[in-house]
Image (tube, rainbow, N blue to C red):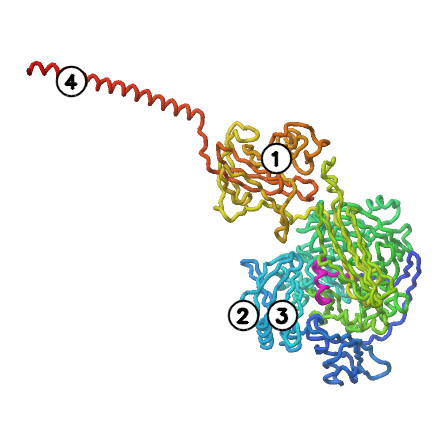
């Protein structure tokens, strides 16, 4: 994967974004007195500003392919241009044209310089042009289908050097002829794209057949699996390969419509641009200028104007926006100390009804790092912060706000005298996903100087932590700040002229230095002032001045260099992060239009540092951190492998920084190797927890004490500006993964008639012996399909563990089952003695007796489980009782009654206290059959009585019947003998 790809991947796996901060408040020139150093700023005459700028670009988006195969477009903006000066290994199409094409046939660093009229010379560029076999790119576009919430991604292959202009501008609806031929040619060689999602690790394949040189891939709409990557097979065509492409595909977002007769909402006339973006969707940006407000969802490839209905704001209010922010609820505007929100249907003022002050608001901010996942033990975390000079409010989804702190309470927490002045100076969200930082302004007399303190609040633990930091500034100075992407709290602060750093949890502080002027950036930029500081995921820091001059340094670096001029000093611009993970510029023109422009930060930084001979102290820094979020459950561990390669005798090592509760143990394995003048140091760190939760006094309290969120940072002990990506920050969440669940094997919701029904349970089969039978509704959605078993067939539940990625393992630890409706007409085939118990084991009967005040589902669980395999635990008893605990290997089965059949709905609960922080339960249902139900005793007696009555009735009737026959036979015989003599 390319450096750009790594940047996007890391950006969205962990935070989905960069950080961009704004300094649009007027602050006069001041003297800054630090704790140890005194800096004085003097106003000097303004010099003439040069409008001569050299820019370059390539046909590849975001400079993805910039090699000897690329056509580099050179452009010089100015009136004094004569010709281009290029090395012999490069050639230009038209040497005397201010706009021309450059090609370099050999790899290396090539010095490009425009020759101009007049004294002096223009800045030269040291372009790094490598040789690469990556020649082609994937082109994609998405079509949304809302009837089934899917998106069809149409993919084809294109060559940036031979592409159609619409493909280069990323607005093509179908491939060009060259792209169709190229895609079909590579398809015959075995090429086929596949989409991988980096967050949830899912894979999507294209349809079986190509359609007009394109592949079609269907993916579901999603808001939490937005980072996708198109990968192909390792197929080459003319020694050229296709670069994998990472892209963001969110649930389709809508821009707010422009309503007729609405009026512009702007910042004050002559002010700098104010910019904000959605926390987890970098391409959704709002820019406030002094003539319009603009909004986009695709990094300003398309955009719309945000306007407000008439008669809500006065003209002065409409043109006095001091800050802006954006969230899923809408776009927030801060105007004259009052907060407003613009939604798709309305523009309204927020205040007392939303638990916000009706005025006096001095700032709003939102999270800058969008962690895809985090662990929060108590309540939901905030997404928004609003503050006055004395109060802090946190905002939550659906416009819910809560006041959490006042300066009066802070004085008590910080042991500050009630008579001293303490105000909220600024508020920012750190890199930690559960914290928020307050910059407090403190003074006694408040006439000359004031101190800036930093206090951090953890939303999970609800603790306030005062940091070991104080900055002395003049009383009329406003200081902006923001935290870097790191495990430990690290931040940069800036006023109008200087940038201050606080590294390694406030242990290293000072002023970012420059080769001259002692860090005063204004003196190096024609007396301009700082407008925006841009920080990306892997530690690049760009300071943009109001006249568009920029300075560059990296995290943990204490000096900055001036970048080459790129933008006209009179043009109003801002800096943001594109959806491809790279810095880009936003320009607003006087005609009320806005245009984005890609900026090659990596190439420009290499060009500036090339002549300084600054080198990276290490050759390579490798690791196996492919995710920035790890869930650590009981009995699990996380192993991280890291390797650094550096020249011999440099003496580098790998630093592991952690920030969070002390709940994990660590083991280190370090391997050294020296060969050919280079040292290779490999370190494997294993994080684990060694706590026994069985038979403790307070199981839930011990769990709470040993769960939490840790941030870890793996970095080299030394770094420099030319170094490649080395920032490796990730989370370890120790606790319950809410996406983890269990299920009993063999049960589903597809192999039965999907409907609810009712059945009755005989009262004698119920545990609590009610006075009448129980009528039960079978909830198919909750219980699933019941498993039909012959009453003679025993059943052993096999419990399996799953997470968001599917099957994990068979559960081998102990678990219990119970019939949720109270049936107890079932048993177990194992006895306590057969199971190996030395003392009487826990049973449902004994646990109910001990916990009569609790419902059935809470009387027995991991919090009170005690095994029976030790004489020291439990007490002697009848070991011939059924053993009611099951696991995978003990062959304990459920046994059914032989005199009746029935429907059983069981709930399973994991009993082992050292298996998981989650309360893992599931439901399964079993229906027994094969036995004719036994009749009632009354019915049997009645049947026997009727049978005996019938028998005796038949007996009596037969007696009289046979007596009649007998008499008939006797009389007939007598009559016969009487007639015989007479006849004789």
> Does residue 907 show up magenta in the picture?
no
* Quadrant in the picture for the N terminus: bottom right
Q: Evaluate whether residue 947 shows in this view.
A: yes
Task: Give the Cα distance between marks 1 and 2.
Answer: 61 Å
Which numbered circle lies on residue 972?
4
Q: Earlier in the sequence, mark 1 or mark 2?
A: 2
- Residue under the image location 70 percent in, 30 percent down: 874
> Does residue 15 show up magenta in the picture?
yes
- Residue under the image location 54 percent in, 72 percent down: 212
Q: Earlier in the sequence, mark 3 or mark 4?
A: 3
| CB within 8 Å, label 1 to label 4 | no
Task: Give the Cα distance between marks 3 and 4.
Answer: 119 Å
Q: Earlier in the sequence, mark 3 or mark 2?
A: 3
Query: Which type of secondary structure does the marked residue at label 3 adopt?
Result: strand
Which numbered circle lies on residue 139?
3
Where is 571 relative to 979, above or below?
A: below
Count neighbours of disc 3 (C-alpha within 10 A) and say few if under 14, some if 14 to 19, many if 20 or more.
many
| CB within 8 Å, label 1 to label 2 | no
Query: Which type of secondary structure does the marked residue at label 4 adopt?
Result: helix
- Disc 1 versus disc 2: nearer the observer: 1
Locate residue 154, reporting x and y percent: 58, 67
Locate residue 645, reporting x and y percent: 81, 64
The residue tagged 1 is 884
Which numbered circle lies on residue 211?
2
* Quadrant in the picture for the C terminus: top left
| CB within 8 Å, label 2 to label 4 | no
Q: Evaluate whether residue 395 shows in this view.
A: no
Q: Nearer the viewer, residue 743 or 248?
A: 743
């Amino acid at each position: 994967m390319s450096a750009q790809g790594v940047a996007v991947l890391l950006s969205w796996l962990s935070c989905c974004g960069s950080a961009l901060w704004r300094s649009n408040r007027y602050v006069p020139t001041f003297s800054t007195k630090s704790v140890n150093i005194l800096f004085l700023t003097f106003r000097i005459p303004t010099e003439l500003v040069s409008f001569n700028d050299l820019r370059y670009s390539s046909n590849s988006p975001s400079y993805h392919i910039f090699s000897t195969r690329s056509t580099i477009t050179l452009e010089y903006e100015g009136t004094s241009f004569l010709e281009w000066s290029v090395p012999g290994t490069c050639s230009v199409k038209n040497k005397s044209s201010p706009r021309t094409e450059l090609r370099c046939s050999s790899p290396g660093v090539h010095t490009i310089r425009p020759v101009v009229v007049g004294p002096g010379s223009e800045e030269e560029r040291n372009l790094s042009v490598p040789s690469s076999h990556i020649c082609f790119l994937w082109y994609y576009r998405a079509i949304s289908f809302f009837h089934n919430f899917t998106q069809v991604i149409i993919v084809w292959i294109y060559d940036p050097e031979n592409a159609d202009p619409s493909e280069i501008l990323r607005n093509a609806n179908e491939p060009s002829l060259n792209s169709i031929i190229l895609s079909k040619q590579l398809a015959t060689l075995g090429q086929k794209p596949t989409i991988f999602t980096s967050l949830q690790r899912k894979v999507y394949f294209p349809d079986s057949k190509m359609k007009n040189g394109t592949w079609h891939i269907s993916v579901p709409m999603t808001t939490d699996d937005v980072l996708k990557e198109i990968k192909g097979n390792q197929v080459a065509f003319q020694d050229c390969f296709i670069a994998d492409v990472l892209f963001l595909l969110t649930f389709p977002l809508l821009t707010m419509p422009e309503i007729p007769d609405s009026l512009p909402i702007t910042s004050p006339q002559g002010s700098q641009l104010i910019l904000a973006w959605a926390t987890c969707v970098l391409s959704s940006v709002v820019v406030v200028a002094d003539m319009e407000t603009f909004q986009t969802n695709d990094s300003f490839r398309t955009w719309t104007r945000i306007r407000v209905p008439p008669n809500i704001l006065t003209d002065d209010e409409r043109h006095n926006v001091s800050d802006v922010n954006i969230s899923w609820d809408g776009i927030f505007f801060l105007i004259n100390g009052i907060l407003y929100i613009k939604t798709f249907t309305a523009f309204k003022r927020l205040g007392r009804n939303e638990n916000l002050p009706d005025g006096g608001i001095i700032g709003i901010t939102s999270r800058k790092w969008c962690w895809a996942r985090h662990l929060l033990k108590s309540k939901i975390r905030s997404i928004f912060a609003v503050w006055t000079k004395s109060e802090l409010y946190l905002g939550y989804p659906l416009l819910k706000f809560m006041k959490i702190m006042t300066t009066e309470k802070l004085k008590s927490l910080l042991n500050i005298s009630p008579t001293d002045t303490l105000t909220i100076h600024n508020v920012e969200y750190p890199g930690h996903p559960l914290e928020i930082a307050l910059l407090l302004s403190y003074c006694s007399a408040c006439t000359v100087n004031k101190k800036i303190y930093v206090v951090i609040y953890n939303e999970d633990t609800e603790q306030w932590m005062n940091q070991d930091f104080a900055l002395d500034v003049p009383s009329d100075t406003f200081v902006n700040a923001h935290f870097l992407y790191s495990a430990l709290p690290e931040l940069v602060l800036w006023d109008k002229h200087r940038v201050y750093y606080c590294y390694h949890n406030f242990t290293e502080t000072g002023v970012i230095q420059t080769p001259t002027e002692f860090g005063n950036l204004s003196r190096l930029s024609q007396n301009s002032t700082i407008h925006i500081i841009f920080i990306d995921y892997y530690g690049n820091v760009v300071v943009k001045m109001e006249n568009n001059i920029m300075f560059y340094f990296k995290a943990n670096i204490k000096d900055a260099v001036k970048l080459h001029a790129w933008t006209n000093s009179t043009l109003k611009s801002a800096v943001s992060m594109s959806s491809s993970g790279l810095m880009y510029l936003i320009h607003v023109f006087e005609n009320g239009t806005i245009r984005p422009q890609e900026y090659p930060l990596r190439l420009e930084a290499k060009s500036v540092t090339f002549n300084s001979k600054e080198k990276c102290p290490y050759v390579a820094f490798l690791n196996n951190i492919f995710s920035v979020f790890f869930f650590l459950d009981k009995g699990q561990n996380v192993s991280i492998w890291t390797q650094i390669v550096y020249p011999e005798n440099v003496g580098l090592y790998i630093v592991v920084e952690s920030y969070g509760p002390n709940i994990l143990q660590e083991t280190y394995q370090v391997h050294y190797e020296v060969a050919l003048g280079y040292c290779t140091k490999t370190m494997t760190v294993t994080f684990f927890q060694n706590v026994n939760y069985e038979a403790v006094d307070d199981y839930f309290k011990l769990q709470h004490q040993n769960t939490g969120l840790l941030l870890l940072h793996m970095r080299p002990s030394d770094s420099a500006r030319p170094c490649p990506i080395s920032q490796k920050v990730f989370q370890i969440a120790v606790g319950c993964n809410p996406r983890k669940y269990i299920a009993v094997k063999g049960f589903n919701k597809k192999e039965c008639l999907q409907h609810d029904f009712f059945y009755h349970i005989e009262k004698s089969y119920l545990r609590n012996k009610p006075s009448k039978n129980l009528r039960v509704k079978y909830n198919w959605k909750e219980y699933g399909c019941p498993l039909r078993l012959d009453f003679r067939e025993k059943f052993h539940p096999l419990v399996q563990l799953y997470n968001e990625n599917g099957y994990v393992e068979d559960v081998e630890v102990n678990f219990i089952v119970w019939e949720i409706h109270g049936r107890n007409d079932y048993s177990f085939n194992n006895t306590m003695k057969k199971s190996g118990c030395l003392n009487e084991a826990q049973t449902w009967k004994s646990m109910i007796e001990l916990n009569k005040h609790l419902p059935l589902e809470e009387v027995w669980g991991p919090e009170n489980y005690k095994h029976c395999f030790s004489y020291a635990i439990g007490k002697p008893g009848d070991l011939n009782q059924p053993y009611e605990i099951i696991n995978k290997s003990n062959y304990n089965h459920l046994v059914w009654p032989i005199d009746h059949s029935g429907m059983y709905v069981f709930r399973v609960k994991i009993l082992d206290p050292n298996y998981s922080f989650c309360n893992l339960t599931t439901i399964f249902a079993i229906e027994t059959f094969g036995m004719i139900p036994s009749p009632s005793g009354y019915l049997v007696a009645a049947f026997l009585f009727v049978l005996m009555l019938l028998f005796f009735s038949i007996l009596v009737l037969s007696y009289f019947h046979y007596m009649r026959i007998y008499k008939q036979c006797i009389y007939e015989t007598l009559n016969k003998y009487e007639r015989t003599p007479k006849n004789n």
